[in-house]
Image: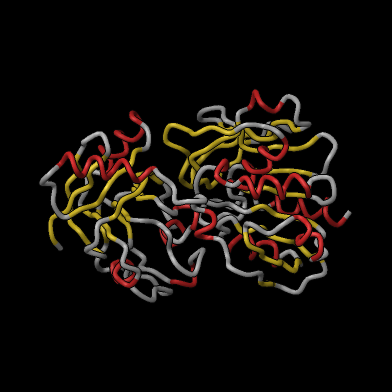
Amino acid sequence: MRRGYLVLEDGAVFEGLLAGSAEDAVGEVVFNTSVVGYEQVVTDPSYAGQVVVMTFPTIGNYGFNPEHGEAARPWLRGLVVRELCEEPSHHAMQETMLAWLERHRIPCLTGVDTRALTRTLRSRGTMGGVITPEVSGLEAHRRRAATGLRPPAGGHVLQVTCRRPYVRGSGDTRIVLLDFGAKQSIARALEARGCQVVVVPADTSAEAVRALGADGVVLSNGPGDPRDCPYAVKTIGRLLENLPVLGICLGHQLLALALGAETYKLPFGHRGGNQPVQDLDGGRVYVTSQNHGYAVREESLAATGAEVAFRNLNDGTVEGLRHRQLPLMSVQFHPEAAPGPQDTLFLFDRFLQVVRS
C-alpha cells in the first residue's frame, strides 16, 4: 500500500493508505454506522456516486462472499475505513475484502481517523470529496471534490436500474417491483412470502405495469435526489388509485412526491443499522436499517390524504406514511433487514395482507 488522501470540498485533508484500485475516486462523502453487514453496504445501489466512510473501526474481518451482496456489481465510488482486515476468518468467506475491492477496481483509503472524519461530516454536512495518491495542488483537488455532488444527466437511478424486466419466484401473488436501485433482499423477502416478483426498469410506464397483471406494486430503494426522477413520479401517480403500493426508502419519497408532497436534503442523512423509529400507531419503537440523504417534508402532507405512520426518534423526521383512503403505505427505512435488525419484516406481511384482501 502507498500513501493516500481524502480531500473534501472545504479543503480538509485526511491521510491514510491506498488499497484496492489506484484510480482516483470522486463522489459525495457519506458515513455509515453499521457494526456488521459491510458486504451488503458496499453492494447497495443506493450508494451510487458516493464515497462511503465506515465508522466501525475494523472492516473485512469476516471476509467477503458475493452471494451476500445486494446487486450484481457495486456502484459506490470509493471506501474509507479505519482498518482493513488482511487476515479475515469465516466459514462462508470466498475472498478477502481487499481482493473484492481490487477485483471491482474500487479505491479504498485505510488507516484514516474515521472518528474525526465523521465528526466533520456531522458538523458541516455531507460534502464532495476525492480519494487521491497526492495532495499537491490542493486547490485543484478541492474544486474537483466539489463536483462529487453533481449527479449524472438523468440522475443516478437510470444508471443502476435493470435494463429489462425479469421474474423471480412463482407464487400466486404477482408483485411488480419498480427497480430504482433495488436491493436483492427486497425481492427475496417477497418471494419468501409466496409472491411472483416481476422486476421492471425505473422508467417503465404505468400502462406497462398494469399490462403485467400486477396485484400490487413495490417502489424500491435507490440513489440520489427523488426530484431527479420525474418520470417515476408520473408513473406512480397513475397507479395510485388502481393498485396497492408499498414504497421503500427512495420509493417512499417518490410516493410522497406523486401525492403532491415535498422532499428536502438532510444535513448528513441516515445511514446505518441502528436508527430508532417509532410506530405512531401504538408507540412501539423499532431499530431499523437505513440509507438515505433525503426526507419528506411533513408540513407538505396536509392536502395529500397521507399521514405520518413512523417517526425517527433521533431528529423527528418522517419515516413512513399511510393513506387515509387508498391502499398506500411507505417506509423510509429498510424492512428487508440487509444489513440490520429484522424488527420490521412484518411490514411485508402487512402489505401483502392488503394486496390479497
Q: Residue 329 in the image: state x and y as whole percent.
A: 73, 43
Relative horizontal placement of residue 156, taking residue 202 as reference (left or right): left
Comparing 340 with 302, the one in front is 302
Q: Give x and y (percent) for residue 55.
A: 34, 46
Look at the image and tell me in which quarter the N terminus lies. Answer: bottom left
- Picture quarter containing residue 240? top right
Residue found at the very far left of the displayed protein: 136
Q: Residue furthest right?
A: 357
Q: Nearer the viewer, residue 24 or 216?
A: 24
Query: How many tags in the picture?
Result: 0
**Residue 182 visible in image:** yes
Residue pushed farthest front? 153
User: Would you place residue 266 above or below residue 179 in this image?
Assistant: above
Residue at left offset 60%, top offset 42%: 332
In the image, residue 339 above or below residue 146: below
14 sits to left or right of 345 = left
* Left or right placement of residue 49 versus residue 134 in this view: right
Q: Nearer the viewer, residue 44 or 289?
A: 44
Residue plotted at (62% across, 45% down): 230
Q: Position of residue 197 (x, y in %)?
A: 71, 66
Colouring chosen for the image of the structure? secondary structure
Determine whether, in the image, residue 15 is placed left or right of residue 30. left
| Residue 287 showing in the rendered view | no
Relative height, residue 221 to residue 307 (above, below): below
Q: Quadrant of residue 7?
A: top left
The residue depicted at 15 percent of the width and 41 percent of the height is 138
330 and 272: which is toward the camera: 330
Residue at (54, 32) in percent of width and height: 264
